[in-house]
Image (spheres, rainbow, N blue to C red):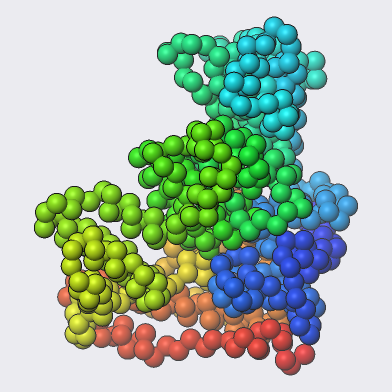
């Protein structure tokens, strides 16, 4: 009974949330007939291949293959779990989530999170008030000396902790328990758990917010001149504070760039750099707190445009973080540029010595991700002798063979040739040789290479989505989803693999999977019922065959390595014989013609 009412509730949220309206709040849409088109928010493109079918309430991208309904759309745009996306839409539609058996765990978790947010917000405001008390003038002076005026202090909610117990007493007055204070990372506790004290004592507190404006923690800068004390101290990891997910200043950036057209973000490393950039009018800046960017960061950044300008520190750690971040961001479909400041300066130093205009020039002269990598390799290479030169050539060729556009490759040839003191033609030939391996039937290297090349072209997202669709068919026991003994497939996702090999059904997974696994596959519960059964079957088969071919190709490579030529030939025939029927753009966009 209760389950049914929750399902009904989810349906009512779905009915109240028009995908076209929701999508329009993120993307400019253009209507053509019954459909709405936009440039895809999930991959980088210049012409619109992302289509929304308003009648059937689903979206599909012909470029990257992403598709789904209003729940998956919000999940992806906001980086939320299925449940949180549903809750967000429910809130928008003024629908209150009912307490039922199957959402109790989640409600408990959400209430716990809300308590942490409340405690952190109270602590934040307490620190902010403290900073302006006369006895804390030295902390205020410190900020002023760093060029952070009162206006910026308020914008960024900077504060100061002047006692061990102040924040504890303040929160107690508001009915916050020690347990919550500790869970929020606001206090540290004694080994016996009986005493608690402020984790940021005698530190200037830089408040950190998430993209929704919740305070999630602090970075404290010590006021003591003691080398034994860490200069900066972050809130410990908590339910809401995870260092690799933080986008410092995202709240301020959002507020300031609300009515401005910005096509992307500038990313700096530390909080002082962030504040300096905002101060100088670069309002579309956020900071990543000294780590390489993660997929999570990329997801947030995508909401603010398709470009990201990286301006991390010039030291070796910063350079390495830049290299890593370029790949992560590009994999997420973002265009990456790198701002290289002279003499290893950070943005705060650069702005205070050279000013706003000079910084704008540095942004205008930013280099592409590939160019940055090529320059980096050059700097790292010892070009004095032949061994060093050969190593350099190998590394740059390795990079360039992954650039699909020959014209783009061509742009870098001259510089590489000049660096080595050789003819451009030689570099070009070296690359071409690598691109066209000798056509020897079934030699190990040629098959592995050609496989690697297709792998590069294959989008990871497409694979994940394929797996998800195939496994969903099994879970929901759809008539078309049949286990095919002898043609088993292997899933990249270990949870999917478990469901597949144990033949788990929807009503069994709650018992067979643990809490974490269930959370990870929450999206599976969202079954796209807008498609007709024929469309579902076709989609499922396409995905299944795609996975099957991948699997055969993997097995073929293994067979080659093992020298089992019979198996190689058998698999080659299977792969050749299997044709994937690709649905045409038009057929899909028009929905089901038989309707
Ligand atoms: Zn796309």
Q: Position of residue 219 (x, y in %)?
A: 58, 27
Please say if 339 is above or below 192: below
Residue at (73%, 44%) from the top-left corner? 256
Among the 4 quarters of the image, the one containing residue 13: bottom right
The residue lying furthest to the top in this view is: 135
- 515 relative position to 394: left or right: right
Q: Quadrant of residue 138?
A: top right
Placement of the C terminus among the 4 image quadrants:
bottom right
Is the N terminus in the top left, top right, bottom left or bottom right quadrant?
bottom right
Who is closer to the viewer here, 364 or 534?
364
Q: Is residue 333 above or below residue 443?
A: above
Quadrant containing ligand 1: bottom right
Farthest right residue in view = 94
Question: Can the viewer see residue 564?
Answer: no
Looking at the image, which residue is at 52% across and 24% down? 233
Q: Position of residue 70 (x, y in %)?
A: 73, 65
* Observer-nearest of 119 and 248: 248
The residue positioned 39% from the left and 76% from the top of the image is: 407
Q: Position of residue 506 (x, y in %)?
A: 63, 62
Q: What's the residue at 39%, 55% (across, down)?
A: 372
Q: Give the image location of residue 322, x and y in percent.
A: 43, 48
């Amino acid at each position: 009974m209760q389950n049914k009412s929750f399902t009904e509730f989810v349906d009512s949220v779905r009915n109240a949330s028009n995908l076209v309206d929701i999508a329009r709040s993120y993307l400019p849409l253009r209507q053509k007939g019954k459909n709405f088109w936009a440039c895809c928010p999930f991959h980088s493109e210049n012409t619109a291949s992302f289509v929304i079918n308003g009648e059937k309430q689903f979206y599909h991208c012909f470029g990257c293959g992403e598709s789904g309904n209003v729940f998956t759309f919000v999940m992806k745009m906001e980086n939320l779990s299925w449940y949180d996306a549903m809750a967000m839409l429910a809130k928008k539609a003024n629908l209150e989530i009912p307490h039922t058996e199957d959402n109790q765990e989640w409600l408990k978790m959400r209430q716990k999170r809300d308590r942490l947010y409340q405690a952190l917000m109270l602590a934040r405001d307490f620190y902010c008030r403290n900073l302006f008390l006369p006895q804390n003038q030295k902390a205020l002076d410190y900020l002023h000396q760093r060029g952070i005026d009162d206006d910026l202090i308020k914008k960024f909610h900077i504060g100061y902790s002047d006692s061990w117990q102040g924040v504890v007493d303040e929160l107690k007055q508001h009915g916050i328990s020690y347990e919550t204070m500790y869970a929020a990372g606001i206090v540290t506790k004694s080994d016996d758990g009986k005493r608690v004290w402020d984790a940021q004592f005698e530190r200037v507190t830089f408040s950190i917010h998430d993209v929704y404006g919740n305070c999630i923690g602090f970075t404290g800068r010590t006021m003591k001149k003691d080398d034994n004390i860490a200069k900066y101290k972050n809130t410990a990891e908590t339910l809401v504070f995870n260092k690799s997910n933080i986008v410092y200043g995202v709240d301020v950036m959002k507020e300031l760039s609300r009515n401005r057209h910005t096509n992307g973000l500038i990313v700096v490393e530390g909080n002082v750099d962030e504040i300096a950039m905002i101060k100088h009018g670069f309002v579309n800046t956020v900071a990543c707190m000294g780590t390489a960017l993660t997929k999570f960061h990329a997801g947030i950044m995508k909401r603010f445009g398709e470009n990201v300008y990286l301006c991390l520190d010039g030291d070796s750690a910063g350079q390495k973080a830049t290299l890593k971040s370029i790949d992560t961001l590009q994999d997420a479909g973002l265009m990456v540029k790198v701002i290289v400041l002279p003499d290893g300066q950070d943005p705060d130093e650069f702005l205070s010595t050279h000013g706003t205009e000079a910084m704008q020039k540095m942004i205008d002269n930013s280099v592409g991700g590939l160019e940055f990598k090529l320059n980096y390799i050059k700097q790292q290479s010892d070009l004095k002798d032949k061994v060093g030169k050969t190593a350099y050539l190998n590394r740059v060729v390795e990079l360039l063979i992954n650039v699909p556009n020959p014209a783009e490759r061509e742009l870098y040839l001259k510089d590489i040739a000049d660096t080595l003191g050789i003819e451009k033609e030689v570099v070009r030939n070296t690359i071409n040789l690598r691109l066209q391996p000798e056509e020897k039937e079934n030699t190990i290297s040629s098959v592995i290479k050609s496989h690697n090349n297709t792998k590069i072209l294959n989008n990871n997202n497409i694979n994940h989505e394929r797996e998800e669709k195939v496994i969903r068919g099994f879970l929901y026991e759809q008539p078309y989803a049949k286990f095919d003994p002898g043609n088993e497939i292997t899933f990249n996702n270990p949870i999917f693999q478990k469901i597949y090999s144990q033949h788990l059904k929807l009503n069994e997974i709650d018992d067979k999977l643990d809490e974490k696994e269930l959370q990870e596959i929450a999206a599976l519960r969202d079954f796209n019922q807008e498609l007709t059964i024929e469309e579902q079957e076709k989609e499922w088969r396409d995905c299944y065959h795609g996975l099957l071919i991948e699997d055969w190709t993997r097995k073929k490579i293994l067979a080659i390595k093992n020298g089992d030529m019979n198996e190689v030939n058998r698999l080659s025939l299977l792969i050749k014989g299997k044709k994937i029927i690709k649905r045409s753009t038009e057929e899909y966009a028009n929905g089901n013609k038989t309707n």
